[in-house]
Amino acid sequence: EAKKVGIELFVLDDGWFGNRFDDNRALGDWVVNEEKLGGSLESLISAIHERGLQFGLWLEPEMISVDSDLYRQHPDWAIQVPDYEHTYSRNQLVLNLANPQVVE
């Protein structure tokens, strides 16, 4: 049906990963939550391709939630101005992409 009305691309938006059940957690934990998807990401992509659509995946690699496994392991990877509290935007912090460990 989607193809008939001109839709060419299916994009899986926010929430496909980790323990992401609201905007306050898991951003940065880029591991597929197969329970939430009802199967593997590969099977979802195959089903979409079988319908003649392309597949896209949303992610925000420069941001991190304080309530995430990645932040708990590497809080120093978030940008921090010395002697100031973190600045939150949409319950998120910005990763320091000037740090080679973060980029890796």
Image (spheres, rainbow, N blue to C red):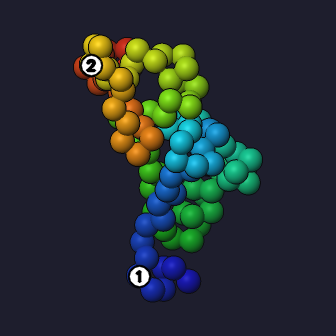
Q: In terms of secondary structure, where does tag 1 sit?
A: loop
Task: Tell whether 32 sits left or right of 30.
Answer: right
Q: Is residue 84 shown left or right of residue 24?
A: left
| Point 27% across, 19% down: residue | 81
Q: In what element is the residue under mark 2?
A: loop
Q: Residue at x 36, y 26 (%)?
A: 86
Residue shown at the point (58%, 25%) measured from the top left: 69
Q: Is residue 61 left or right of residue 46?
A: left
Residue where numbered disc 1 is placed: 6
Q: Position of residue 32 (x, y in %)?
A: 61, 41
Q: Which numbered disc, 2 or 1, marks the residue closer to the eye?
A: 2
Residue 18 picture location, percent across and down: 62, 38
Mark 2 = which residue? Answer: 81
Q: Amino acid at mark 1?
A: Gly
> Residue 21, relative to residue 19: is it above or below?
below
> Residue 63 falls in which quadrant of the image?
top left
N-terminal-most mark, 2 or 1: 1
- Left or right: where does residue 99 sit relative to residue 46? left
Name the quadrant containing residue 93.
top left
